[in-house]
Structures are given as structure tokens and as C-alpha cells.
Image: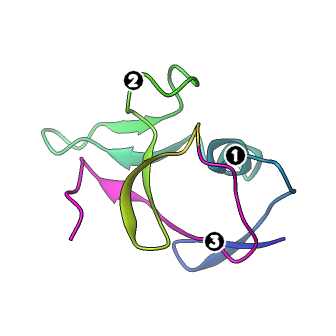
């Protein structure tokens, strides 16, 4: 599957979540907090905590632990939480 993260190709397998692909690629964090810029990544892993938010194909605040990758997905790391445009 072809997936990019911040413009860089990342290996991914069918059925893998965004969080799993990011962790497998050696990226333990992919968001930081608005207040203080503290790094965030996978915390609860079940879609409860909102720490793993990313932008997927232009849609912000997607929980990486819940989103199964699709071929061609464009993932962008984000700062804090973003409101949809």
C-alpha cells in the first residue's frame, strides 16, 4: 500500500491502523499539545483519549488508533486539535 506521512512514504499493510503504521515506522509521537508543545502519540489505543489525533486526507482530528489505512492515504501530523474547515 502507498501511504504518506508529512509527505514521506511510509510502509503500510492492508488492515493496519494509522497508529500501527506510524509506530512500525519508528514514530512514537505524531501530535503535540497546543499548550506547551508536549509530544503525543498512542496512549489508550481504543479511541477514548484523543491523544493520537492526525489529519487524514485533509480531515483533521482523526483518531489514528481507530482509522484503518486505505491505499493512497495522506497523513499529516498536527498541533493540538484542529477544527474541520
Residue, far left: 35
Model colouring: rainbow
What residue range appears in magenta? 67-85
In the displayed structure image, the side of residue 52 where residue 45 appears, left or right: right
Q: Quadrant of residue 19?
A: top right
Badge 3 marks a residue whose secondary structure is loop
The one of 25 and 12 positioned closer to us in this rendering: 12
- Secondary structure under the numbered disc 2 in the rendered image: loop
Q: Cα distance, mark 1 to mark 2? A: 16 Å
> Residue beneath label 2, please?
49
Distance in Å between CA atoms under marks 2 and 3: 23 Å
- Quick one: label 2, few (<14), some, or many (20+) residues within 10 Å? few
Asked if the residue under mark 2 is in contact with the one under mark 1, i.e. CB atoms within 8 Å, the reply is no
Residue at (24%, 47%) from the top-left corner?
80
**Location of residue 10 by image quarter:** bottom right
Q: Position of residue 11 (x, y in %)?
A: 81, 64
Query: Of the residues under marks 2 and 3, which one precedes in the sequence?
Result: 2
How many neighbours does mark 1 have within 10 angstroms: few (below 14), some (14-19), or many (20 or more)? some
Q: Which mark is residue 34?
A: none
The residue that appears at 54% across and 45% down in the rendered structure is 64
Residue 44 location (% of width, % of height): 52, 19
Q: Classify mark 3: residues with Cα within 10 Å, few (<14), some (14-19) or many (20+).
A: some
In the picture, which quadrant includes the N terminus? bottom right
Q: Which mark is residue 73?
A: 3
**Label 3 – label 1 distance at C-alpha:** 11 Å
Q: Residue at x 37, y 32 (%)?
A: 50
Residue receiving disc 1: 17
Query: Is residue 22 depicted above or below 28 in this figure?
Result: below
Upstream in the sequence, badge 1 or badge 2?
Answer: 1
Residue 6: where, in percent of width, then height? Answer: 51, 72
Is residue 15 magenta-colored?
Answer: no
Amino acid at each position: 500500500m502507498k501511504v504518506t506521512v508529512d509527505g514521506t512514504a511510509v510502509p503500510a499493510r492492508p488492515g493496519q491502523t494509522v497508529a500501527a503504521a506510524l509506530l512500525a515506522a519508528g514514530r512514537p509521537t505524531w501530535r503535540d499539545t497546543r499548550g506547551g508543545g508536549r509530544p503525543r502519540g498512542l496512549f489508550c489505543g481504543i479511541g477514548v483519549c484523543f491523544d493520537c489525533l492526525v489529519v487524514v486526507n485533509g480531515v483533521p482530528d482523526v483518531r489514528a488508533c481507530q482509522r484503518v489505512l486505505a491505499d493512497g492515504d495522506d497523513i499529516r501530523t498536527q498541533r493540538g486539535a484542529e477544527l474541520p474547515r
